[in-house]
Amino acid sequence: MKASTRLAVASAILVLIVPAATQAHFTLLEPASWLIEDARGDPQKSGPCGGTNTDYGRPSYIVNHAVGGSKLHVKVQETIYHPGHYRVALAVSSPAELPLDPKATTKDTDRGPQSVSAEIQNPVQIPVLADGLFVHTAKVETPFETDVILPNINCKRCMVQVIQFMEQHGVNNPGMFSYHHCAALQITADSKKPIDAAWPKER
């Protein structure tokens, strides 16, 4: 057998033996994403709102609309399975207001640190709207969806952030152990309800 043939056979066997690195992905179906996502939801590694080190993403220019103090429907589709959970947060004036990714507990492996779990806010604190959503340890084919209550505020261009924290995952550059999506949201306060003074006013 020629050396080149032996090398090709060995490479094929190695591909079958060595498991591929698992990278979770999700698409933001509702509200509509501020970036144009591909079928897997990319680009989504960078915080706080997606993109990567080499692809900042193309804006969709979609602005969603909602009434303050009402329910916002959140719907995501996990395109590549990984165990973990999701969190939803809201920035009033700038994505810089969004919280840091959840603090992770890790373990050392021969491939580097691997996530074990992450802090979940209970009760949630501003600017987080919901945390510990869609906890799962098995592949789910149907979308995850829920309603979160918006504060009764006015803002022309709030940003809703949905992140996925991944358990049993190596360090993701960038993004560590989370994937990120955002949606631009214009909120009009419900005049029949008091303004949520705990939330910052739009600058």
Image: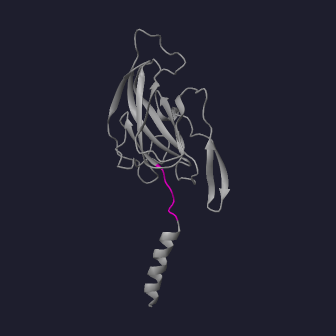
- Residue 58 position, x and y percent, is 35, 45
Q: Is residue 12 left or right of residue 65?
A: right
Q: Residue at x 47, y 32 (%)?
A: 94
Q: In the image, which residues are magenta?
A: 19-24
For the rendered model, the colour scheme is: one colour
Q: Residue furthest top?
A: 192
Q: Where the N terminus falls, by quadrant?
A: bottom left
Q: Is residue 89 magenta?
A: no
Where does residue 73 sit, x and y in percent of width and height? 40, 29
- Most extreme residue toward the left is 61
Q: Quadrant of residue 143?
A: top left
Q: Can you give x and y, in whole percent of width and height, for residue 181 in the image?
A: 44, 40
Q: Nearer the viewer, residue 47 or 108?
A: 108
Q: Is residue 80 above or below residue 31?
A: below
Could you tell me which residue is drawn at 42 percent across and 19 percent down?
68
Q: Position of residue 164 (x, y in %)?
A: 50, 42
Q: Residue at x 50, y 62 (%)?
A: 20
In the picture provided, is 6 more to the left or to the right than 124? left
Residue 154's place in the image compared with 86, above or below, is above
Q: Does 22 lie within the magenta span?
A: yes
- Main SS of residues in magenta: loop
Marker count (numbered): 0
Residue extending furthest toward the bottom: 1
Instruction: Tell me the residue at 32%/34% (across/down).
Output: 62
Choose top left, top right, bottom left or bottom right for residue 71: top left
